[in-house]
Amino acid sequence: MVDNEIVKGSTERFGHSWNIFSEVLPIHEEQFKRWTTGLTAEDFKEASFLDVGCGIGRNSVWPLKYGANNGLAIDLDERTLAAARNNLAQYPEMTVDRRSAYEINEENAFDIVFSIGVLHHIEFPDKALANMTKAAKPGGKVLAWLYGYENNEKLIRYFNPLRLFLFSKLPLKLVYLLSAPLTAILWCLLRLGLNRIEYFRLIRQFSFRHLRAIVYDHMIPKIAKYYKKEEAEDFFKRAGLQNVEVHWVNEMSWTVIGTKSANEEGE
């Protein structure tokens, strides 16, 4: 049962986005590989995994293609879940369930637990990470991809206040319309030489529609936290994870990965 009292974030707003941008694209695999830096395709082979905040299920597709034995993907919005079930329909070993990150009931169950682009959008990320850690098997891996503070200073200083006080409160249909001219500006800037960091060089390859999905997703959330490297590392250490690694992704975000203690089974 979803506890609506503590699920405060942007579930319904991202549901609107995923209902529009519901397709899995080949380029999503390259994004997944970058977001899961610290793991390889071989790590997913014959593994069980949990995808927390699965969206349209695109980040569950690749572990399954790499040979995972089974997986569980969870999210909240019914439109999001419908898209995920459609995208993962060919994988009978995959379960898609309506649950929040605060309601992971499994314990010592998964070889790999990951959350990509979700924990920086929720009110209680420490609670969510604690549940993710609990769900991992002793010796299992826990991973999250987080917005980085470094190289996002201008975005935080100028765009974030606009998002917070305007875009996050406007009707979604209007925000979606406004995303088109903003995407057009970004599209032009990328072709005029905006390539100073790896992220810009990556998204220059994207179609206008894919680029618009990214712009729209940055406009709609009610919560968006940007982590400095030491904050991202401390976040995982507070959860009791060991051998914590922090990887710089696209020169503007962090992938953090840790190992659950092998001695936690049955505690």
Image (cartoon, rainbow, N blue to C red):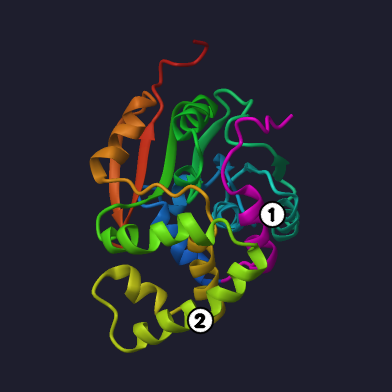
- Residue 10 highlighted magenta (yes or no): yes
Rendering quarter of residue 242: top left
Q: Is residue 186 toward the left or the right of residue 109 in the image?
A: left
N-terminal of the pair, mark 2 or mark 1, is: 1
Q: Is residue 51 toward the left or the right of residue 153 in the image?
A: right
Q: Amino acid at mark 2?
A: Pro
Seen at 26% across and 70% down, the residue is 197
Any mark on residue 181, and which? 2
Q: Is residue 162 toward the left or the right of residue 251 in the image?
A: right
| Range shown magenta | 1-25
Q: Amino acid at mark 1?
A: Thr
Q: Residue 162: where, in percent of width, then height?
A: 43, 62
Seen at 64% across and 25% down, the residue is 105
Q: Main secondary structure of the magenta part?
A: loop
Residue 4 or residue 240, whichever sits in front? 4
- Give the class, few, some or many, for how many residues have Cα within 10 Å of label 2's Cα (few <14, many ≥20): few
Disc number lying in front (2 or 1): 2
Residue 229 or residue 91, whichever sits in front? 229
Quadrant of the image containing the N terminus: top right
Q: Residue 153: where, in percent of width, then height?
A: 27, 59
Give the Cα distance between marks 2 and 1.
25 Å
> Does the image show residue 57?
no
Q: Residue 150: where, in percent of width, then height?
A: 25, 55
Any mark on residue 194, and which? none
- Residue 244 highlighted magenta (yes or no): no
Q: Secondary structure at mark 1?
A: helix
Rendering quarter of residue 22: bottom right
Q: Residue 147: where, in percent of width, then height?
A: 38, 52
Say which residue label 1 marks: 80
As drawn, 5 above or below 213:
above
